[in-house]
Structure formats: structure tokens, C-alpha cells
Amino acid sequence: MSIPAPLRGCIADARWVSERTAARLPETPGSYVVLIRFGKRLALDMPGLGNPVFARGWYAYCGSAHGPGGVRARVSRHLRHEKRLRWHVDRLTVAASEVRAAAFQGLSECDLVGGLLAVEFTVPVPGFGSSDCATCPAHLLMWGRDGKGSGSGAAAPH
Ligand SMILES: [Zn+2]
């Protein structure tokens, strides 16, 4: 399944790559969004975050990479299904039906979170991925209220 057009529209100007096309990503430092699709409802064991249940649908994880290999190295790891589980997000990407990613220059991961929260993304698990961050409610977001978007392209009422 490819990324639904309304979801693509939420993150304009992103060039999405898969594991197969990850070599297109820059090897420079930067931020990124990983889109994760669950094909079915999942309960996942998340040390420190309990046992959150994830509805079927699309999620976005925002991060940044400043180490060797830059965004390409980090995101390539996120896109791989086979890996040692190190971060919470690894438990999502190995369970996902689909994983895509895009890199951004000149924006922090917190800028990306803010932008997505402004366009109908919500927080499924408070604190997920943001333990080092003083400003974001989480660095993992859910598309709409249920992983499927609002259908209107506008922020859903709370
Ligand atoms: Zn943040």
C-alpha cells in the first residue's frame, strides 16, 4: 500500500523513501519523519510506557540524526525490519506493515512534531520518543484520531 494522498498532503514537499530507496537520503545531519502503518490493531510491550494499544492505521515518528552517516544511516535503520531492539520506535517498525521516511533540512524534529500536530495529527502515547524533549507531548504521532486521518484535511475537534 502506498501513502494515502491526504496523508502525503499533510507533509508537503516530503520525498518518501522505502528500505529499497533509502540510498537517496542525504548523509548529512538533519531531521526526519518515519511513517509507520499497522495493518491491524496491535498491543505492544513498551518498557516504561506500559502496554499501549495501536489502532490500525498510520503513525509518524519524528527524529533527528547528527552522528556518522547522518540521516541516511539513521533512517535506513528505522526502515529495516531486522534489527536489534534498541529504542521504543524499533518495536513499532519491526511490527509495521509498511514503513516510509523522508528527510528535512533546517527543521528540528520538534518543528516537525509541531507542524504535524497543527494538521490533524494526535498523540497516541504521551511521552513516546520525547523523554529528552522539554516541549513536545511525544515524538510519535497518530494520523487523525484513529490512524486514518479526519477525512477533511483539517484538524479534528477534540
Ligand atoms: Zn520535541
Image (spheres, grey):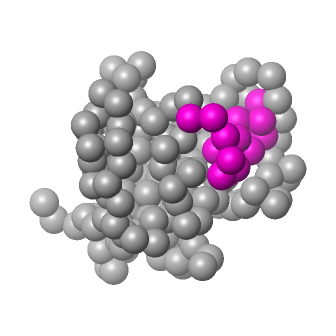
Residue in front for this viewpoint, 2 or 77: 77
Whether 153 is among the magenta residues is no
**Residue in view at x 54 percent, y 41 percent:** 90
Does residue 53 appear in this view? yes
Q: How many marks?
A: 0
Q: Is residue 47 above or below residue 16?
A: above
Residue 137, quarter of the rendered image: top left
User: Which residue is painted at 80% across and 47% down in the image?
Assistant: 25
Q: Quadrant of the N terminus?
A: bottom right
Dominant secondary structure (helix, strand or loop) of the stretch shown in magenta: helix
Give the magenta range: 70-85
* x 54%, y 78%: residue: 5
Left or right of 73 in this view: 111: left
Determine which quarter of the picture holds residue 3: bottom right
In the rendered image, residue 40, in percent from the top left (x then y), is placed at 39, 71
On the image, the x and y values in percent for residue 135 come to 33, 26
Residue at left 56%, top 29%?
86
Q: Which residue appears farthest toward the left when viewing the image?
A: 158
Whether the magenta-drawn stretch holds residue 80 is answered as yes
Q: Is residue 28 visible?
A: no
Q: Position of residue 60 (x, y in %)?
A: 47, 53
Give coordinates of residue 116: x percent, y percent: 41, 52
Residue 121 found in image quarter: bottom left
Question: The C terminus appears in which quarter of the rendering?
Answer: bottom left
